[in-house]
């Protein structure tokens, strides 16, 4: 690896390109422009495409008849770094430790997309051209649902026609083991706010006479699951496509112990999840309901004898084949409304990020491409636990065979 590659990586990571928070809007544009300049320098025709929120970077080489067309997808936006006090180093000041770069976005997705760009750069430098017609589409809204990616793709449908789409926003099953993902879970998000009194109340005066919104919210959220880890929302599993026998067999043959790997990576004392499935099956093939954030009442140091006027929670639902984001949202709203105490009011802000999924689940397709992957020492078929976006991925390497 060239010495300057690491510095370029660091420069890319220093942009606090947090897409969900509008206070970082200018930094996202600066990050996108950094990509435009980099791609122009290596010889690609690059443009910054404005959207209703954060811009899309679109690059391509000179297309020639008779060559296959490859579209490489990535994103330059990142998740918020909070809570900052849990970081050993500033999230946007990259640090190299024990062979790993620690920074927000280092593996989701700046590291992967920069690796593609540097590979393209070296190929052009060595051969003066690429063996394929290429499109690079790098968006700035993946972490908030890619709301403007769809319109961009529809508007440029003919220009972006390709033979294969390559996405490296996933993980590898193990170090040194090439990994092909044929499908990933989708996600849809919901926020709920529960309100009781019109203002915060003194618990010594009103405690016991009015419903406590925080207590009610905790009880409400507890109804989302049963004790065996199943999601208790009526109709939640109706469209879930069950795992096929060949999938379970393929995953059992992976060269890793999924349970051990997750325990080591997370540090949890014991694994927990939906009964009847092992850890790999849970994170790759089963839907979930997750509480991502909760708040309400006094958060400062010490004690304040207050009954908060309201409390809120942020929820997401991981989706698998055939589940529909809009439908899951409606089922969740119905469930929450049914279980909310009458002594409280609730508010549901507009739901964010309904992300569709696209999974190829036919044995004929998977077995055929599994054979091709075996040639490349590929060891897995689905995504890693860190997978965030639902798209089909194929190996770019096949065009160099």
Image (spheres, rainbow, N blue to C red):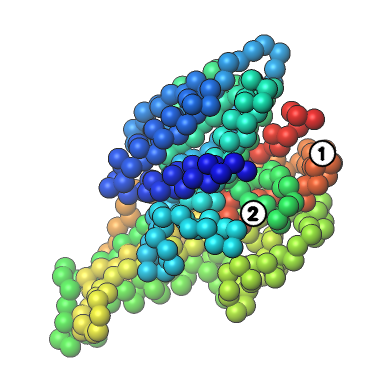
Residue at horizontal 63%, vertical 51%?
171
Residue 209 sits above or below residue 346 on the image: below
Of the 4 image quadrants, the one containing the C terminus is top right
Task: Say left or right for 378 vs 270.
Answer: right
When asked about the image quadrant of residue 200, the answer is bottom left
Secondary structure at badge 1 equals helix
Considering depth in this image, is 93 or 174 the residue closer to the camera? Answer: 93
SS type, badge 2: loop
Where residue 287 sits in the image (x, y, percent)? 59, 57
The alpha-carbon separation of the residues under discs 1 and 2 comes to 20 Å
Residue at (65%, 45%) from the top-left corner? 183
Residue 308 disc label? none
- Residue 380 seen from this side: no
Badge 1 local density, few (<14 within 10 Å), some, or many (20+)?
A: some
Kindly give the residue lying farthest to the bottom in the view shown.
Answer: 204
Q: Is residue 211 left or right of residue 160?
A: left
Image quadrant occupied by the N terminus: top right
Residue occupying the point 16% across, 68% down: 198
Give the residue number, with chain letter if any, for mark 1.
Answer: 372
Q: Which mark is residue 384?
A: 2
Query: Is tag 1's residue or tag 2's residue first in the polypeptide sequence?
Result: 1
């Amino acid at each position: 690896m060239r010495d300057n590659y690491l510095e370029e990586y660091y420069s890319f990571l220093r942009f606090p390109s947090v897409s969900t928070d509008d206070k970082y809007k200018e930094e996202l544009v600066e990050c996108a422009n950094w990509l435009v300049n980099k791609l122009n320098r290596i010889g690609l025709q690059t443009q910054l495409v404005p959207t209703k929120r954060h811009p899309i970077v679109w690059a391509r080489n000179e297309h020639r008849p008779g060559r296959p067309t490859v579209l490489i997808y990535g994103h330059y936006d990142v998740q918020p770094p909070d809570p900052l006090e849990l970081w050993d180093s500033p999230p946007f000041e990259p640090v190299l430790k024990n062979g790993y770069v620690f920074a927000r976005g280092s593996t989701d997705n700046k590291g992967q997309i920069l690796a593609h760009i540097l590979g393209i750069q070296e190929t052009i430098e060595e051969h003066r051209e690429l063996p394929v017609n290429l499109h690079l589409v790098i968006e700035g809204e993946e972490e908030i649902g890619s709301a403007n990616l769809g319109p961009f793709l529809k508007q440029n449908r003919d220009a972006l026609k390709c033979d294969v789409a390559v996405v490296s926003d996933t993980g590898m099953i193990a170090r040194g083991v090439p990994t092909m993902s044929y499908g990933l879970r989708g996600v849809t998000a919901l926020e709920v706010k529960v309100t009781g009194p019109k203002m915060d109340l003194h618990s010594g005066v009103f405690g016991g006479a009015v419903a406590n919104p925080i207590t009610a919210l905790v009880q409400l959220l507890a109804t989302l699951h049963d004790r065996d880890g199943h999601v208790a929302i009526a109709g939640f599993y109706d469209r879930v496509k069950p795992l096929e026998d060949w999938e379970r067999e393929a995953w059992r043959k992976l060269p890793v112990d999924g349970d051990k790997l997750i325990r080591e990576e997370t540090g949890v004392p014991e694994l927990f999840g939906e009964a009847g499935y092992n850890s790999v099956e849970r994170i790759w093939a089963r839907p979930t309901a997750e509480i991502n954030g909760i708040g309400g009442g006094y958060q400062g140091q010490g004690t304040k004898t207050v009954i908060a006027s309201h409390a809120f929670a942020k929820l997401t639902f991981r989706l698998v084949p055939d589940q529909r984001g809009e439908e899951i949202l409606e089922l969740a709203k119905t469930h929450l409304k049914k279980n909310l105490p009458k002594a409280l009011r609730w508010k549901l802000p507009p739901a964010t990020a309904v992300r569709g999924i696209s999974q190829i689940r036919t044995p004929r397709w998977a077995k055929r491409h599994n054979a091709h992957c075996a040639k490349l020492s590929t060891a897995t078929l689905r995504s890693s636990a860190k997978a965030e976006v639902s798209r089909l991925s194929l190996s770019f390497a096949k065009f160099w065979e």
